Image: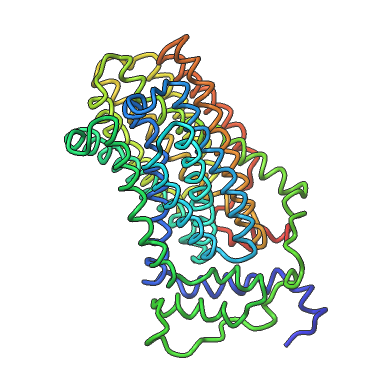
């Protein structure tokens, strides 16, 4: 065993030993289960983000809400998400990733049920704020957990794959569900002024089941080691190595790590000053600006696309169906992001996708007239939107050390969250003044800024988390 002094000088080597252990363990059945549980929460996150644009007619019928009111409702939920991201990130870095994820989903379920019974617009806005808080940290803390639990060579692909189920499948299934509930089942569920309430119930109740299932999910070994909880870290590593989350039949705990592997930050308060160091500020600024542009563009389109299509003369049912078809591009974009994550650098992927996405936005603004071109160009833009969001999602948690990873990721994602609140409000008057073309030209400019910002973020491809952050620990 090393002395205290020798351990201090060997921090990078000790931290690297955990990475070596996880690389040897590889990918097991336990990893599949944990990734699936994280993905399930993200799936409901995606569905909730899409609801505001889909239930516009229902909210107009119930509360007389106009376009500006709907944009504000989206803003309220996103602000709640910002609060949730920061609070949950802070909680996850202290109490653990698993604890924070369970808390998030419980709060989300409560807010969803309150939304379903909202008697007026003000009550609905408060309930959506609660939903936003609950969902706020679901995505970022889930990313932090998955990023910390897998081998280096799988890390980018697995983190990106989460967005296949949430942003990709989630967006597609969302509008399919909306089309069924607000279409054929609309009259059965009480008509336009009531069917949207049942939609909120359908989204809230299943999430409660995930809370109970997540009790069996192991904590991040990296988080446990950063807190000096060596025995628990070894138990978590044993669970992943055996492929069994239940202790029954797993066998004795393997001592993968020793006291020499415990980092020096144990026993100290979480070093939040790490987030304001020059290196961290540069990383946060670069990926934060990229997130602002990427997430803001996606949410703007999700919120306004049904209205854009209605303004083009399509019915609300046709608009929802068209939006669902376009989101096949989202699914494909998320899949491609997961595939390239193992073979292409994060920076190269983001810059390339931003440039091509800019071209797709200009093409939509110029040529999207008629059903065929609207679907084709809209799907193309959605492809690059999810390719960008998915890669940024995998990139963000990699650039922060374990002690502040959840909070750092939450801050970066929160910047994008604010954009999702602000940019639709900016887009509404642009749409009123310049129509569909004005909105897509705005999105094109946002992607140009995104490409420039990404050039200043560090490349993390094929580096362990400890190698990426050794200068910040």
Q: Is residue 331 above or below residue 23?
A: above
The one of 181 and 65 positioned closer to us in this rendering? 65
Q: Is residue 337 above or below residue 206?
A: above
Which residue: 59% across, 45% down? 83
Which residue: 48% across, 61% down? 102
The one of 436 and 91 positioned closer to us in this rendering? 91
Q: Quadrant of the N terminus?
A: bottom right
- Residue furthest to the top: 433
The one of 375 and 24 positioned closer to us in this rendering? 375
What is the count of numbered marks?
0
- Residue furthest to the front: 119
Q: Colour scheme in the image? A: rainbow
Q: Is residue 271 above or below residue 444?
A: below
Which residue: 53% across, 47% down? 133
Residue 296 in percent (x, y) is at 51, 32
- Residue furthest to the right: 5
The one of 212 and 324 positioned closer to us in this rendering? 212
Q: Quadrant of the C terminus?
A: bottom right
Residue 151 in percent (x, y) is at 50, 66
Q: Is residue 336 above or below residue 241?
A: above
Residue 372 in percent (x, y) is at 24, 21
Task: Residue 405: name its quadrant.
Answer: bottom right
Task: Residue 374: name its quadrant.
Answer: top left
198 vs 111, left or right, is left
Residue 60 in percent (x, y) is at 36, 24
Which residue: 68% across, 72% down? 13
């Amino acid at each position: 065993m090393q002395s205290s002094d020798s351990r201090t000088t060997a921090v990078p080597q000790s931290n690297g030993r955990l990475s070596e252990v996880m690389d040897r363990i590889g990918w097991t059945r336990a990893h599949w289960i944990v990734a699936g549980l994280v993905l399930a929460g993200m799936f409901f996150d995606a569905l909730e983000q899409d609801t505001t644009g889909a239930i516009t007619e229902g909210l107009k019928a119930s509360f007389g809400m106009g376009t500006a009111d709907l944009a504000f409702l989206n803003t309220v939920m996103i602000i709640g998400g910002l609060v949730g991201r920061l609070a949950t990130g802070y909680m996850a870095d202290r109490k653990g990733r698993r604890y924070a994820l369970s808390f998030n989903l419980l709060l989300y379920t409560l807010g969803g049920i309150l939304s379903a019974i909202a008697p007026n617009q003000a009550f609905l806005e408060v309930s959506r704020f609660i939903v936003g808080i609950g969902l706020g940290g679901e995505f970022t803390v889930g990313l932090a957990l998955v990023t910390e639990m897998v081998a280096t060579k799988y890390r980018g692909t697995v983190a990106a794959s989460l967005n296949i189920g949430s942003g990709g499948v989630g967006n597609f299934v969302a509008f399919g569900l909306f089309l069924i509930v607000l279409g054929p089942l609309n009259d059965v569920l009480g008509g336009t002024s009531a069917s949207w309430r049942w939609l909120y119930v359908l989204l809230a109740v299943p999430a409660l089941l995930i809370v109970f299932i997540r009790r069996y999910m192991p904590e991040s070994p990296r988080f446990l080691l950063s807190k000096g909880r060596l025995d628990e870290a070894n138990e978590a590593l044993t669970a992943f190595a055996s492929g069994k989350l239940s202790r029954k039949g797993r066998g004795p705990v393997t001592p993968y790590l020793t006291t020499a592997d415990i980092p020096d930050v144990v026993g100290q308060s979480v070093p939040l000053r790490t987030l304001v160091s020059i290196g961290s500020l540069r990383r946060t600024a670069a990926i934060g600006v990229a997130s602002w542009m990427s997430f803001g563009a996606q949410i703007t389109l999700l919120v306004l696309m049904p209205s854009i299509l209605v303004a083009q003369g399509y019915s609300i049912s046709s608009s929802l169906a068209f939006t669902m078809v376009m989101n096949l591009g989202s699914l494909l974009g998320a899949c491609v992001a997961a595939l390239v994550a193992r073979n292409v650098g994060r920076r190269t992927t983001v810059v390339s996708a931003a440039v091509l996405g800019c071209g797709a936005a200009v093409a939509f603004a110029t040529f999207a007239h008629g059903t065929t071109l609207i679907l084709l160009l809209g799907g193309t833009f959605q492809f690059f939107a999810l390719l960008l969001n998915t890669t940024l999602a995998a990139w963000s948690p990699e650039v922060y050390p374990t002690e502040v990873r959840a909070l750092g990721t939450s801050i970066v994602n929160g910047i994008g969250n604010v954009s999702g609140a602000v940019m639709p409000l900016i887009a509404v008057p642009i749409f009123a003044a310049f129509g569909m073309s004005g909105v897509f030209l705005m999105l094109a400019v946002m992607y140009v800024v995104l490409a420039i910002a990404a050039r200043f973020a560090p490349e993390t491809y094929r580096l362990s988390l400890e190698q990426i952050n050794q200068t910040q620990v």
